[in-house]
Image: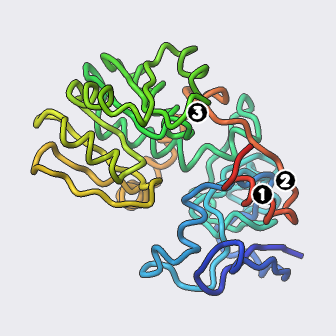
Amino acid sequence: MNAALFYRKFGLPEQVLTLEYSNKPFLKENYIRVQMLYAPINASDLIPITGAYQHRITLPQIAGYEGVGKVIEAPLSYQHLIGKRVLPLRGGGTWQNFVDLPAEFAIEVPDSISDITAARAYINPVAAWLMLKHYSPQGKHILVTAAGSDCAKLLCNWAIKFAALSVTVICRSDNHAQYYNKHTIKHIKQDDKQTIEYFARQADIVFDAVGGELAETILAHMPESSEFVSYGLLSGAFFQPKKRLPKVHWFHIRHYLKQISQNQWLKMFDDIWPILDANDLNVANLFEFNDWLEAIKTYRHPL
């Protein structure tokens, strides 16, 4: 029996998600079946449920985009995966007990990677990796917003690995100051407009997940030769550049994944696993699947 969190209409996740039970159908040809171990909650999981992207979502849907599990069924050519941990990506929603997906897209998890880290190895690590590959930090001054997010931490640390000249991060509070001090990354407060303007004038690349007034302030002071990469709107507000330049890029992970081959998909994780450090991810709160409402509440209002 499979338990899954469905949404059959759009709305607030706490109101439209329903836990439903059913028998899984027979496994399709060249598919594997994965028994889920952990599946995290991200903004990217919750926002589609609200209907923000309803033009490309056909209801009903099972929620969840990432996680880790063990392979329990596989075709003959993939029998070596039985019992192995994989990321069950590019299949059905991950907020369920069992996920079926095309065997060729399963990402094997190295023994050195814990379950908790593996479960979060897709959305933020892949986004950070793709952004840094497309907008190389080498020899450049980097400014990153939304300091408390996993993606920001990965962007900062990986930019240093990829030979950035400097990395500065904008924090809403001092909660993450200790982390950035340990990595000798300059951090500035989001309400310190004068300092933000100073570092914006030095920035070659900005990675922004906030939008709104903060994005407009940064854009107004950046050099014309620099680049601004927007990958989120945590403020809930869009922004309007006050001048034509610098260049503004809109990063959406799905656009890049549509363009890569199966071999490129597998190779991407081969590159990510060696540099993915659990210490660069926020501490996870663990919940039983049936406590999904409490898990969402904790995500929205962390302690």
Q: In this orientation, which residue lies closer to the viewer: 106 or 118?
A: 118
List x then y, in percent, for residue 58: 53, 84
In the picture, measured across the screen, residue 100 lies left or right of residue 151, that is right
Mark 1 or mark 2, which has the lower sequence index?
2
In the picture, measured across the screen, residue 270 lies left or right of residue 300, that is left
Q: Is residue 157 above or below residue 151?
A: above
Can residue 15 be seen? yes
Residue ID for mark 2: 287
Residue ID for mark 1: 295
Measure the C-alpha gap from mark 1 to mark 2: 6 Å
Q: In this orientation, which residue lies closer to the viewer: 186 or 18?
A: 186
Q: For the residue marked with disc 2, what is the amino acid? A: Phe
For label 3, the SS is helix
Residue at point 18% right, 42% down?
Answer: 220
Label 3 neighbour load within 10 Å: few <14, some 14-19, many 20+: some
Measure the C-alpha gap from mark 2 to mark 3: 25 Å
Q: In this orientation, which residue lies closer to the viewer: 255 or 283?
A: 283
List x then y, in percent, for residue 132: 36, 35
Residue at point 41% right, 49% down?
Answer: 210
Q: Is residue 175 above or below residue 105?
A: above
The answer to whether the residue labelled 1 contacts the one labelled 2, judged by CB atoms less than 8 Å apart, is: yes
Mark 1 or mark 3, which has the lower sequence index?
3
Which quarter of the figure has residue 179?
A: top right
Q: In this orientation, which residue lies closer to the viewer: 166 or 87?
A: 166
The answer to whether the residue labelled 1 contacts the one labelled 3, judged by CB atoms less than 8 Å apart, is: no
Residue ID for mark 3: 273
Mark 2 or mark 3, which has the lower sequence index?
3
